[in-house]
C-alpha cells in the first residue's frame, strides 16, 4: 500500500519525484475496499501554491489512480476534499 503526493508537473514529466509518500497499514476486504489503519492527509501547504497536486494510489503493487486530486476519479477511489486539502480513509479498488 502506497500513497504518493506529486507536484502537478508529474502529469507531463515522468521523473518528477513525490513530495510526500505514505505507506500506511491497511486491510483489503472482500467488498473490494482497502481500509487504512489511519487517515492519510495531503494538506494544501504540502504542494506549491496555485498548482494542483497529483495523487498516486498503489495497492499490492498495482496502480489504481494517478492524476490530479481534484478530478472525479480521485473521489471515486475515496479521496475527499476538506478545507485544508485532501484526505483518504478508505480506498475503493473496484474497477
Image (cartoon, grey):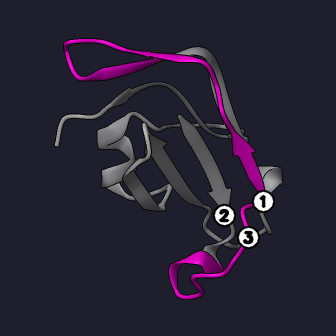
Q: Is residue 43 visible?
A: no
The answer to whether mark 3 and mark 1 are in CB contact below 8 A is: yes
Question: What residue is shown with label 2?
Answer: 6
SS assignment at label 3: loop
Q: Quadrant of residue 19?
A: bottom right
Residue 12 in the image: state x and y as whole percent: 53, 87
User: In the image, which disc is placed on residue 17?
Assistant: 3
Residue name at image x 44 percent, y 60 percent? 66
User: Which is in the foreground here, disc 2 or disc 3?
Assistant: 3
Question: Who is closer to the viewer here, 10 or 74?
Answer: 10
Disc 2 crowd, CA 10 A, few/some/many (<14, 14-19, 20+): many
Q: Secondary structure at mark 2?
A: strand
Q: Are marks 2 and 1 in contact (CB under 8 Å)?
A: yes
The image quadrant that residue 9 belongs to is: bottom right
| Alpha carbon separation for disc pair 3 and 1 | 6 Å
Vertical order, 82 against 56 (above or below): above
Amino acid at each position: 500500500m502506497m500513497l504518493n503526493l506529486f507536484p502537478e508537473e508529474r502529469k507531463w514529466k515522468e521523473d518528477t519525484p513525490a513530495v510526500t509518500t505514505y505507506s500506511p497499514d491497511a486491510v483489503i476486504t472482500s467488498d473490494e475496499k482497502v481500509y487504512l489503519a489511519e487517515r492519510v492527509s495531503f494538506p494544501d501547504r504540502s504542494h506549491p501554491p496555485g498548482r494542483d497536486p497529483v495523487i498516486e494510489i498503489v495497492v499490492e503493487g498495482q496502480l489504481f489512480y494517478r492524476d490530479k486530486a481534484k478530478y472525479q476519479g480521485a473521489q471515486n477511489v475515496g479521496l475527499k476534499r476538506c478545507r485544508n486539502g485532501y484526505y483518504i480513509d478508505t480506498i475503493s479498488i473496484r474497477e
